[in-house]
Amino acid sequence: MNNIHQDIAERGLTVVVGCTKSGKSDHLLVLESRLKIKGLEIVFVKPGHSGRRGTVAWRSGGKTERIISFAKVLEVVDPIKDEIDVVMFDDAHFLDSGLLECVDILVRRGKSVVVAGLNLDCNGEHIGDIRDLSMLADAHHPLYGVCHVCGNVEAKATRSQRMKNGKAIGAGDIFVVPEGQLFPVCREHFVKPTFESSLVRIKGGKGKKDVLACKKCAYEFPIGLKPAKCPDCGSRFINKGNV
């Protein structure tokens, strides 16, 4: 379904977008192999997760030769010297708000820039600078997944759905959705998360204390704590004073 035989915009911006598990990172590797045949020098920029610093990697022959780290994406600009032809950003939705300026500087310096990221988050909202970059792009590579619900490859999964205990839920922090809870779904089967839930009391057994839990995602809190909303699924508790 995904067309990997696409060229990038020379000395311009190419944006690769798609839902989770649509092959964005693999697509960059395919592009890299084709560009290497042309003798172009490429670096990969990848954000850090969970507070870790991001990295810029110089690769040769499919192997990483040198890596530097960065805290803010604008720190990427100076280390990328004249001999670099192509700069590829993977997981760009995790990068900070300096991405637009960073990309603009690199393109003005004559670099071919490829940015890959999620089109929408699991709450069905635009994420990071991807939408703005798509509007400015010289070339677009849209990618699609296979729907986790219907499995129909023709349906073109374009949404990322968070599922827990068989239920579609949102996320209070889209950057810390646990592994194994995010799935590609088509438009028909995407469930827009709601952000209301209830606190329920769970009885402890055999010496264990009772706890409170979010009815929607089962996130637990100690008795005595009455949060306004769940930090896991982002739902507002409508009964926080009545448990």
Image (tube, helix red, strand yellow):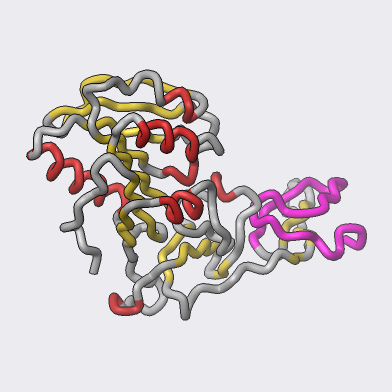
Residue 193 lies in the magenta stretch = no
Residue 37 lies left or right of residue 90; in this view the side is: left
Q: Is residue 136 above or below residue 76?
A: below
- The magenta region covers 217-243
Farthest residue in the right direction? 241
Residue 110 lies left or right of residue 134; in this view the side is: left
Point out residue 73 in the picture as x, y percentages from the top left corner: 47, 30
Quarter of the figure that contains the N terminus: bottom left
- Give the residue displayed 78% in from the left and 46% down from the top: 222
Q: Is residue 58 above or below residue 121?
A: above
Quarter of the figure that contains the C terminus: bottom right
Point out residue 116 in the picture as x, y percentages from the top left corner: 36, 48
Q: Tag count in the figure?
A: 0
- Nearest the viewer among 233 and 109 is 109
Point out residue 192 in the picture as x, y percentages from the top left corner: 59, 71
Which image quadrant for residue 147? bottom left
- Give the residue displayed 39% in from the left and 19% down from the top: 78
Residue 227 lies in the magenta stretch = yes
Looking at the magenta stretch, what is its main secondary structure?
loop
Farthest residue in the left direction? 37
- Give the residue displayed 64% in from the left and 60% down from the top: 217
Point out residue 166 in the picture as x, y percentages from the top left corner: 53, 69
Residue 114 lies left or right of residue 188; in this view the side is: left
Q: Is residue 37 above or below residue 171?
A: above
- Nearest the viewer among 230 and 222 is 230
Q: Is residue 123 above or below residue 117?
A: below
- Give the residue displayed 47% in from the left and 80% down from the top: 188
- Nearest the viewer among 201 and 161 is 161
